[in-house]
Image (cartoon, rainbow, N blue to C red):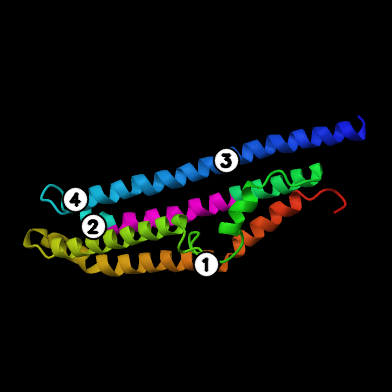
């Protein structure tokens, strides 16, 4: 093969990888949206059922479900960051091969939300007013309200005379929930504000897509 043919083949391979990376990124973002939408419906259903006489014990599960959903939100946000980093490096490499900047989708995205910088679920001090961050803030506020509503309803239920057999469980419920929630929230804050893992991930992808000899 001539140098021109090798160059064209390399670009074709990179474009194929870029297409796969964009599909994966789109999949991660769809998962994130589904989690937020279906998670909100699940919390609402547990709240309604927990505040009725049909199955009041559903309120006990609500706070734990809220914590689980927030943790999954963090997990999917990290996957989105991975997908973005993959797309960004492929776009940069293809632009370098072509000798001009033609692929700019991730460059534009990075201006709104740079990769590898401290944030909390994508929320930073300088992007709190955009619609993407406000949507997450809105969702987190709903999660907090659902959490509090579940705890209040649970405390009321466990005080009922007909539930005396679970009195010991009631004594442990709030402390266990507090420890579990605190551990998860502190981990999320540490993980995203430090952003050490995200920085390493971005750097590793960057190294892999550097041309030989650079």
Relative horizontal placement of residue 86, taking residue 208 as reference (left or right) = left
**Nearest to the observer: residue 152 or residue 128:** 128
**Nearest to the observer: residue 43 or residue 168:** 43
Element type where label 2 sits in the image: helix
Task: Report which residue position mark 1 lands on.
Answer: 126
**The C terminus lies in quadrant:** bottom right
Image position, residue 19 (x, y; %)? 64, 36
**Dot 1 and dot 4 residues touching (CB under 8 Å):** no
Q: Residue lying farthest right?
A: 2
Element type where label 3 sits in the image: helix
Q: Is residue 6 magenta?
A: no
**Dot 4 and dot 3 residues touching (CB under 8 Å):** no
Relative horizontal placement of residue 113, taking residue 65 as reference (left or right) = right
Residue count near mark 4 (Cα–Cα under 10 Å), binned few <14, some 14–19, many ≥20:
some
Q: Is residue 72 magenta?
A: yes
Sooner in the amino-acid sequence: mark 3 or mark 2: 3
Give the magenta-colored segment's residue range.
Answer: 63-82
Task: Report which residue position mark 2 lands on.
Answer: 60
95 vs 15: above or below:
below
Q: Tell me if residue 113 can be seen.
A: no
Image position, residue 93 (x, y; %)? 75, 46
Whole-number angstrom distance, CA of label 1 to CA of label 4: 37 Å
Q: Which mark is residue 24?
A: 3
Task: Report which residue position mark 4 lands on.
Answer: 48
| Residue located 54% across and 50% down the image | 79
């Amino acid at each position: 093969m001539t140098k021109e043919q090798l160059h064209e083949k390399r670009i074709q391979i990179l474009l194929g990888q870029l297409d796969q990376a964009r599909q994966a990124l789109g999949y991660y973002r769809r998962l994130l949206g589904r989690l937020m939408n279906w998670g909100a419906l699940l919390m609402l259903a547990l709240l309604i059922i927990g505040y009725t006489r049909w199955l009041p014990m559903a309120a006990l599960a609500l706070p734990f479900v809220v914590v689980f959903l927030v943790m999954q939100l963090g997990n999917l946000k990290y996957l989105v960051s991975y997908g973005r980093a993959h797309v960004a490096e492929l776009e940069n490499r293809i632009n370098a091969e072509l000798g001009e900047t033609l692929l700019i989708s991730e460059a534009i995205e990075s201006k709104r939300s740079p990769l590898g910088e401290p944030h909390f679920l994508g929320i930073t001090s300088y992007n709190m007013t955009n619609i993407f961050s406000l949507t997450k803030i809105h969702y987190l506020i709903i999660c907090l309200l659902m959490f509090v509503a579940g705890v209040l309803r649970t405390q009321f239920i466990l005080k009922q005379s007909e539930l005396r057999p679970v009195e010991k469980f009631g004594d442990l419920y709030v402390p266990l929930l507090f420890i579990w929630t605190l551990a998860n929230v502190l981990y999320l804050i540490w993980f995203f504000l430090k952003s050490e893992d995200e920085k390493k991930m971005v750097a590793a992808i960057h190294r892999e897509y550097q041309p030989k000899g650079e």
